[in-house]
Image (cartoon, rainbow, N blue to C red):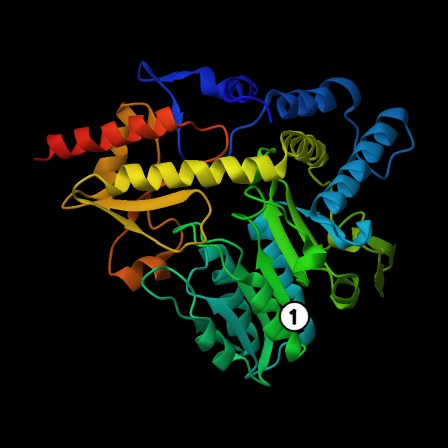
């Protein structure tokens, strides 16, 4: 693995200052920064071979189409899917979940059917299913969590029934960092022939994702969470499921033949890719996956585990700081609150010190309701962060405390 100075040099934004202070970027759960190779790749598309994909017969279109399909293969290999036809490009995790919620609902859901989620879900893995349930007369069931921020597996097993049609859970909580036991969740659902969707928005960048080993039926994630461009996401689905689902959008490229009497749809994966897809971002995502692979996913996971341990120890030692989410299985995310100080005040003062953290409910209000709080301060770390930056955060917290003393 490169040393940390070399890694940080790959990310141009990390050189900048905020309010005259060196940037300490601890909002990686919201979006990751981009290495120069990704920025250069997207620039190259626009500068050298920008042309709309698939439908052109000219040179630029051919080049764009080839790079776009190579990006699809790159994603397939990265998550270890069986076939490139199982990789659908979308606008992001939210777009992927909304698409499946619509299509799966239209095809398989009838009144009284049940969908199982967990209490740890991001709103993007709650609201689309609520909308589908309202539309189809189905019911949501929720796996509760304990005070460590872990789902209670025994309660999940009790929820599974003949009415269950799908389970949709996050791989890791964006609010607490808890890693869910997805293999156990999937195995139990498959025991009664129920498919499972895994929201990988907070999982894909923190370790190795192997959809075959996991045996999930759907896996979704966003490019911007794994050092790639914004506006691009992935929907992986087993071929047997994608083949049976109707498209969730209509338009160009997703059709086979169109008449006013009837339209037939394109083959996989194109029947789910309506209109002009964000091909520059897809090509940029492939560059990001190459970058992560070159650094080494095992190396990234090991370094982030070390950073999490150091940050947890450092912040836990500060009087008045309470950390939410104490599972032994976590990604490098720490959600905390300083006694008697509102999280927004903490975040705004830290910002003036050049420290970027996230404040609020983190689009996970049911998690906050569980703890009876309005929100937290979240520091989400990744492999380009340093222990010195964690020290800066700890010093910033002490300063916040002194200002409100």
Q: Quadrant of the N terminus?
A: top right
Residue 276 falls left or right of residue 301: right
Query: In the image, what residue occupies the spot 48% across and 74% down?
Result: 156
The answer to which image quadrant residue 211 occupies is: bottom right
At horizontal 40% and vertical 70% (from top left) the residue drawn is 144
Local crowd at mark 1 within 10 Å, few (<14), some, or many (≥20)? many
Residue 266 at least partly seen: yes
> From what the image shows, is residue 175 above or below residue 138?
above
User: At which x and y percent is residue 65?
Assistant: 83, 35
Q: Compared with residue 167, is residue 211 higher up or lower down, i.e. above or below?
A: above
For this rendering, which residue is in front, 69 or 49?
69
Residue 299 lies left or right of residue 158; in this view the side is right
Quarter-of-image position of residue 197: bottom right
Task: Tell me which corner region of the image, top left, top right, bottom left or bottom right, holds residue 338.
Answer: top left
Q: Which residue is mark 1?
A: 195
For residue 299, above or below residue 23 = below
- Front in this rendered view, residue 337 or 56: 337
Q: Where residue 355 sits in the image (x, y, percent)?
A: 33, 27
Name the residue at the right extreme: 57
Front residue (pair 26, 294): 294
Position of residue 85 relative to residue 186, above or below, is above
**Where is the C terminus found, in terms of image quarters?**
top left
Q: Would residue 224 be visible to someone looking at this image?
A: no
Q: Which structural element holds mark 1?
A: loop
| For residue 385, side relative to residue 317 (left or right) | right
Residue 305, position as x, y percentages in the image: 47, 41
The residue at 31%/17% (across/down) is: 19
């Amino acid at each position: 693995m490169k040393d940390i100075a070399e890694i940080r040099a790959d990310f141009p934004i990390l050189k900048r200052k905020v309010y005259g202070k060196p940037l300490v970027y601890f909002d990686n759960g919201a979006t990751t920064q981009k290495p120069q190779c990704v920025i250069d790749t997207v620039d190259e598309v626009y500068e050298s071979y920008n042309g709309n994909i698939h439908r052109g017969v000219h040179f630029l279109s051919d080049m764009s189409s080839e790079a776009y399909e190579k990006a699809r293969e790159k994603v397939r290999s990265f998550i270890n899917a069986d076939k490139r036809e199982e990789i659908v490009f979308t606008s992001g995790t939210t777009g992927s979940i909304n698409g499946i919620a619509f299509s799966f609902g239209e095809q398989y859901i009838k009144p009284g059917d049940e969908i199982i989620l967990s209490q740890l879900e991001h709103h993007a893995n709650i609201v689309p299913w609520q909308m589908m349930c309202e539309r189809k007369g189905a019911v949501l069931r929720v796996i509760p969590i304990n005070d460590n921020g872990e789902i209670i597996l025994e309660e999940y097993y009790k929820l599974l029934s003949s009415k269950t049609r799908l389970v949709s859970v996050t791989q890791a909580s964006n609010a607490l960092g808890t890693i869910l036991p997805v293999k156990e969740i999937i195995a139990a659902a498959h025991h009664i022939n129920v498919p499972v969707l895994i929201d990988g928005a907070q999982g894909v960048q923190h370790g190795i994702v192997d959809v075959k080993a996991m045996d999930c039926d759907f896996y979704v994630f966003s490019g911007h969470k794994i050092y790639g461009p914004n506006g691009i996401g992935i929907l992986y689905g087993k071929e047997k499921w994608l083949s049976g689902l109707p498209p969730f959008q209509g338009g160009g490229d997703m059709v086979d033949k169109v008449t006013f009497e009837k339209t037939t749809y394109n083959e996989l994966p194109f029947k789910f890719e309506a209109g002009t897809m964000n091909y520059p971002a897809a090509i940029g995502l492939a560059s990001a996956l190459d970058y992560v692979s070159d650094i080494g996913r095992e190396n990234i996971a090991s370094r982030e585990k070390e950073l999490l341990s150091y940050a947890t120890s450092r912040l836990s030692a500060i009087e008045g700081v309470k950390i939410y989410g104490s599972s032994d299985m976590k990604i490098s995310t720490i959600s905390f609150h300083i006694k008697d100080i509102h999280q927004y005040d903490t975040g705004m003062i830290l910002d003036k010190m050049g420290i970027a953290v996230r404040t609020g409910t983190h689009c996970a209000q049911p998690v906050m309701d569980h703890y009876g709080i309005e929100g937290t301060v979240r520091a989400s770390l990744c492999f380009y962060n340093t222990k010195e930056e964690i020290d800066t955060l700890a010093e910033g917290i002490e300063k916040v405390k002194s200002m409100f003393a």
